[in-house]
Amino acid sequence: MYQPRFQIQIGSTTIDSQSQTAQNVVVNLRVALAMNTGAHICSVALGRTDDLRFNGGAAPAGGASGASTGGAALSVRTGDKVTIHLGYHTDLTQVFSGEVDEIIPGIDALVVNALTSDRHLLTLRYNQIYERQSAGNIVRNLASRANVSTGTIDNGVDFPLYAVDDGKNGYEHILELAKKCGYECFVDTTGALMFREAAQGPVAKTFEYGFDILKARIFRHESAIQKVEVRGESPASSLGNEKAHWLVKSFEQSLGIAGTGKPIRNVQDLTIKTKAAADTVAAARLDQLNARITRGHLTVLGVPAIMLGDSIKLTEMPEPDLNGTYKVRAIQHKFTREDGFLSEVAVQGVADGSPGGGIGG
């Protein structure tokens, strides 16, 4: 197998593990990616060597703090663009794109923490009433106000009226919309915000126990909820989105329902004003609950090509029931002197009927 390799771009400087100097400088590297949580993080620990000395860099105009390495002329400042490529030999895959958010100097190392560009949504506080807009249009507007680039933005639920207030930051509002629609929300490896249907794609990678998989923990339980009922503000869908909304004695005609049986999860959501939207939200909530029936964590030899939302397949597991297809929900790539290049992958079941899928399996 080819030797594992990293390539770190910080500002105008590239640190490549194929360089003997870089091998001494980088103590460890960690990239953490996850769906529906917030900005991704990359942490690089740069160690002190005889040839590289850390000096307090003069802050540029604007007051940003910084640090530099004398021998290699490496300068690190908050706001610098950071790009991480991981792989083997000449086969490298970009796994992170973001900006330096924090620099932590230490006696034996300098830790550089970077966040993806959607971090700007975490500081966005905004008040706006949206009329006759889809969830996707609201997400596009919030992203543009935070200067965050967008990738795939699906429309999702249509809202006759939707309010965004400064009691929550922009990311919290987007995650709420993702939950209502049952969507995946994350930033891809190029830094583009994704807001998309949680569709199952083809299997991107097959992992074999004892060959690719070093550790595996899979949890399975029976769903405590069999049915979801969603009540909105008023039953207006029978007359259309343009009609006024009013309070009524009974919500039976506008009740959103997904699933059958008991126990029942009751959801009251005042942003939902039509039966069509209530049905969509109910189905999304039930899918989210079912997806949690099967969850797990894998430790595998470093696989940079696996992306959030990918479907993966497990084979030759000690327990045959654990074989099957899963969906990637979070990834953590680690590159250390002690363990080399490893990837930790958090997975959940998929609705494919396979034994490992958990949903319908």
Image (cartoon, rainbow, N blue to C red):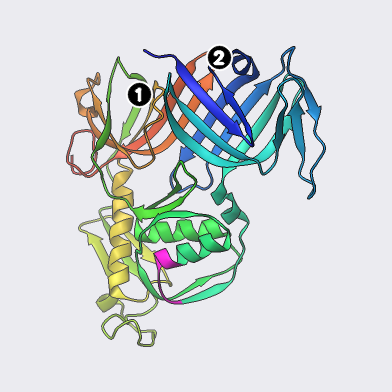
Q: Which residue is mark 2?
A: 337
Spot occupied by residue 103 in the image (x, y as percentages of width and height): 71, 35
Q: Secondary structure at mark 1?
A: strand
- Residue drawn at 58 percent across, 32 percent down: 9
Question: Callout 2, which amino acid?
Answer: Arg
Q: Amino acid at mark 1?
A: Ala
Which residue is the site of mark 1?
Answer: 216
Question: Tag on residue 128?
Answer: none
Magenta-tinted stretch = 131-137
Q: Quadrant of residue 41?
A: top right
Q: Position of residue 118 (x, y in %)?
A: 54, 51
The mark total stands at: 2
Task: Say if residue 44 shows up in the picture.
Answer: yes
Locate residue 8: give its quadrant: top right
Residue at x 24%, y 39% (from the top left corner): 358
SS assignment at label 2: loop
Camera-nearest residue between 13 and 320: 13
